[in-house]
Image (spheres, coloured by chain):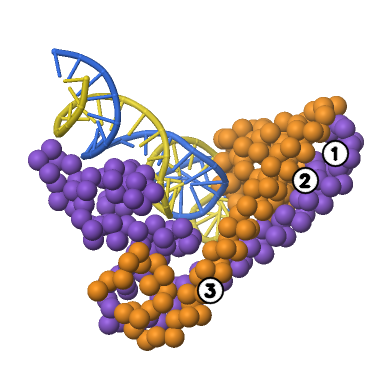
Chain colours: A orange, B purple, C blue, D yellow
Amino acid sequence: MKIGDLAKLTDTRVETIRYYEKEGLLPAPSRNSGNYRVYELQHLNRLSFIRRSRDLGFTLEQVRKLLKLADNQDASCSEVDAIATEHIIEIDRKISDLTLLRDQLLLSVDCCQSDTIADCKIIESLAPFKNH
Amino acid sequence: MKIGDLAKLTDTRVETIRYYEKEGLLPAPSRNSGNYRVYELQHLNRLSFIRRSRDLGFTLEQVRKLLKLADNQDASCSEVDAIATEHIIEIDRKISDLTLLRDQLLLSVDCCQSDTIADCKIIESLAPFKNH
DNA sequence: ATGCACCCTGAAGTGGCTATAGGGTCAATA
DNA sequence: TATTGACCCTATAGCCACTTCAGGGTGCAT
């Protein structure tokens, strides 16, 4: 399988695959006579794992840890649980931050019935003091 | 006012203030005999506006536009409204993405009652196929 | 005179890619 | 056989919004 095929199968850009290789997330595959990368099923599996993890918002650093843990089938999965739980907490934090922020913005936008900047409630909500 | 004072008043790092100056968001202040930046009230106002906008999640590019609009008191505020509304839509998108993602993760974590990686539901939910 | 907190500049690093330049490979077609 | 065009290669720079670092200067108190 060539890099383009792998890219299509995993919905990943070719450059991203090469980037993962450089970062040590994906093992360097063998090369054919023309120096093209040749991928096997194991690469497809590993890249799918990485992409799925990234889609779920894990950082590459977290993915690195998850891969290492996944490789060790006999190890305890408590560490996996810890990473996932910490990630959920982080996501919850983001959601509540964004919700607060959204409400504040909506308030300004809804209130702004004026025509000019001078009376614009949005600008006013950003300014520290009245300009006069 | 020296840069450190301005930093404290606006809860901004000194380096960030210099960065905003380099980026043209904050006008270059005058200097004292020792080449230290000397800030006036207008700088405090402008930096506060920038920080508040950033806190609300606007990009620096959006802040740049908002500042330009805010400077022109007679202009129509419809553009401001457009920027803010587009931003709210963006935030809504992020919130719903994160909520979906959170639910998926929670499902895996709640289901994982096993001890070893081999049976870990979280790892399983990331893996594309069963490893056997 | 010395210490220390603060200030200066310029360059490089962060994450997670994406884009660009400048080339090589390979299979199909004219 | 020559050529086209899709694909591949490497190396480097760019993106955002800063942060960090190296290597120095200033200013005030002790």
- The residue depicted at 57 percent of the width and 63 percent of the height is A100
Residue A20: image quadrant is top right
Q: Quadrant of the N terminus of chain A?
A: top right
SS class of the residue under badge 2?
A: helix
Q: Nearer the viewer, residue A46 or B74?
A: B74
Residue B126 is marked as 2
Residue drawn at 36 percent across, 52 percent down: B10
> Are the residues under marks 3 and 2 on the same chain?
no
Q: Secondary structure at mark 1?
A: loop
Q: Which mark is residue A99?
A: none
Which residue is identified by label 3?
A: A106
The residue positioned farthest toward the left in the image shown? B33
- Asked whether the beta carbons under mark 3 and mark 2 sit within 8 Å of each other, the answer is no
Of pointers 2 and 1, the one earlier in the residue sequence: 1
Which of pointers 3 and 2 indicates the residue nearer the eye? 3
Give the residue type at disc 3. Answer: Leu
Residue A79 location (% of width, % of height): 75, 33
Residue A62 quadrant: top right
Task: Give the position of the C terminus of chain A as an image quadrant.
Answer: bottom left
Callout 1, which amino acid? Cys
Badge 3, how many Cα within 10 Å: few under 14, some, many 20+? some
| B75 horizontally vs B86: left or right | left
Q: Are marks 3 and 1 in contact (CB under 8 Å)?
A: no
Letter of the chain that mark 3 sits on in the rendering: A
State which mark lies toward you, 3 or 1.
3
Q: Chain of mark 1?
A: B
Q: What residue do we see at 62% from left, 37% from top?
A: A61
On screen, residue B122 versus residue B67, left or right, reads: right
Kindly report the distance in space between the C-alpha atoms of the residues bearing marks 3 and 2. 37 Å
In the rendered view, tell whether residue B113 sits above or below residue A4. above
Real-space CA distance between mark 3 and mark 1, rounded to the nearest whole angstrom = 43 Å
